Amino acid sequence: MKKVVLILAGIALASLPLLSRSGEAPEYSSSVELYGQAEALYSQGKYRQSLQLLREALDKNPSFSKAHLLSGQASIEISDYERAIVHLDQVLRADPHNLDARIGKGRALTGLGRLQQAETLFQEVKEKDPGNVDNLYGLAQLRILSGRYDLARQYLGLILRKDPAHRQALQDMAILETRAGRLESGRDYLKRATAVDPAHNSVSVTRGIVLSLQADYASSEAERLALKDEAADAFRTAARENPGQELLQRIIQLDIERGYPEDGLDILQQARESYEGSRLLLLAANLSHALYNKTGERKYLDQAMDDLKSLCAESPEDVLACYRLEMLSLENPGTAELRNMLAQRHLQLAHAYESDLRYGLLVSHLKEALKLSPGNAEIENRLLEFYRSEGDFNAYLQTLVNLRDQNPDEPLWQYRVERALQSRKQYLSYREDLQQYATGDNRTRRPTVVLVMDFESLDQSHWNEEQIVSRALEDSINDISKLQPASRDVKTRIREMRGAETLRQDEDIEARLQADYRPLLFEAQDFEYLDELDRRMDSRLRIRYILSGSFRSFPGGLEISYTLRDRFTGKEILSQTSRASGEDALHVVTNRIASNISSIAPVRGEIVKIANDRIYVHAGAADGIKKDQVFMLDSDPARLFRVVEVDTAFAALKPEGRGNLLSPGMVLVSNPRRP
């Protein structure tokens, strides 16, 4: 299911010649001895022990350049990239042309995500020493991180032609080949890497990654879980020597995926003793969420929400955390205080967009705030005042209508709706007594229904991030009058139908699967499942589009690639990529996608009244209808109608030409060729 992100193996530099002079002070000699011991530990993959000895060596001789170089390289291996740069800069101040230090700094910058700066350093080294194997390996890592796997293989192949026993290149080839589904080739590369140095700590890490990736190609759930169990053992073996934060994160993620989140509690405590920050908060939230999903115990839910609350407040670069917290707060009781806090966040974002004159996003954030804090007078009045100041009577009235429907026991809203209608004596819905169709269950509404599948994550971080993106898209689609997301019950039924076609798992496996969120990604047979569901579904709610795709989150931003398919023909209607940055990137990009869908979706209006050569349909300006727009009869596209009057929720049309008798319940559809 969720793919383990590649953990890049480190570079082992060749032993450096040690310089010494006769007659040196005993302190300097002891620093050389400490360096020699540290170098031996480094070559065995025991980076933390190596760093401890290097610290002692530098205490005795702070200007010991080789100790700084090895300290930088060892710091990289435990993902302490900032400290690595401090040591490597010390080397470069003494020797600006030191290629090993420049390569090391490039690797550290790569680890920090500063890929362009790393590329510049590697290219500078390449100009001076084109065949430098360590530099070629740094370039290969950059290509992997950029998703350019074919180029990475070319660099790794060049390295292996120069040095067939280059362990790190063999390890990365094992990962890349397995990831591409070439399992035998991956096993062969791993076997060759193990033969080079079977005791090296990073070999256990690579073995864990390869086993995790093999699990994605398992033929049964039992086989998949068995491979993940083996991978967890390999990671734990590596963590005994080098419990780096990234490795501990992988263990916890794997414990969740294999259905034993309780095993990750000790690892989380170990991580808390050594690390802090946003990555640790996310780890803790994921583990607690998985434990809650498996056990149903409220204490785990509360802990997950506490960690996400801290993450939302302290790490705006995590663009999924706040929305994930909103989902939990809306789904569970006892969260009123939390929802009010999240509503205030939307109000702040709305204020920022008001300053930038970006009114679409302003209104969208106000609506989200109102959803989190219904009945909040401040938010309601801000929405109404905004529409009034903009002179948008239709939006003003629609907001009043929505508030009336959300508060059926509060007569004030009905009174304000009536007053608003009376202020426009010639307003269509008031004059023609059409308001009755805009209240109650809205059975005459005919929105275009979109089934939003879970979106595949290309870089897993949150426990249920496939669902997070899917829900955010549903909210954005629901915010557009002529669109409507399919009921979540539909996805539940599809999941059940898929499960009915597979053999039932034994009870132990079923229990283990409860801990992990298993995304419902689009599959071709879903068209058949929808055909079956159509027989039991209200025709007004029949699904017309299927939205699916993938996404990649990065610090402070999000990129979503999506495909919109016609549910009846299977034809792809839209296939695009949308990207946004900023703390509300998820909100921005999902609203943009919903807007793109709206631009190609027709307006569907059910006929509710026929009088005096006019046809009145339940679709209006809120759905994008404009005066003089052309519609056609859904059951007879040759019958055309032109809009002569429109208000927020209704439109009046006149037929162009003669035809068979019409009756309420028939549907008119906007004609994309006759605007």
Image (tube, helix red, strand yellow):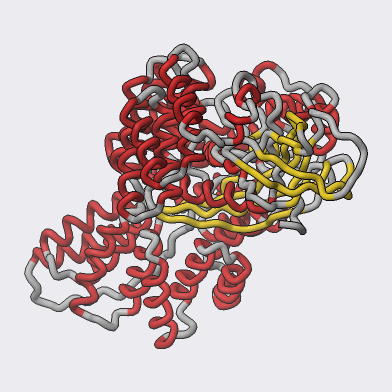
Q: Examine the rendered structure and indicate whether residue 547 appears above or below residue 576.
A: above
> Residue visible at 30% across and 53% down?
355
Most extreme residue toward the top is 409
Most extreme residue toward the bottom is 128
Task: Estimate the x, y position of residue 506 in percent, counting from the top left.
Answer: 72, 19
Q: Is residue 626 left or right of residue 50?
A: right
Q: How many marks?
A: 0
Q: Examine the rendered structure and indicate whether residue 109 appears above or below residue 456.
A: below
Q: Nearer the viewer, residue 585 or 214?
A: 585
Task: Estimate the x, y position of residue 321 in percent, counting from the top left.
Answer: 41, 38
Query: Would you identify the image quadrant in which residue 306 lies?
Result: top left
Q: Is residue 336 left or right of residue 232?
A: left
Q: Nearer the viewer, residue 667 or 483?
A: 667
Q: Nearer the viewer, residue 260 or 501?
A: 501
Q: Nearer the viewer, residue 674 or 481?
A: 674
Most extreme residue toward the right is 660
Q: Is residue 594 left or right of residue 524?
A: left
Q: Is residue 43 visible?
A: yes
Q: Is residue 211 visible?
A: no
Task: Estimate the x, y position of residue 575 in percent, counting from the top left.
Answer: 68, 57
> Residue visible at 41% across and 28% down?
372
Query: Would you identify the image quadrant in which residue 535 lies?
Result: top right
Task: Estimate the x, y position of residue 103 in percent, counting from the top left.
Answer: 37, 73
Quadrant including the C terminus = bottom right
Q: Examine the rendered structure and indicate whether residue 314 appears above or below residue 111.
A: above
Quadrant including the N terminus = top right
> Residue visible at 42% across and 64% down?
12
> Residue visible at 32% across and 58% down?
81
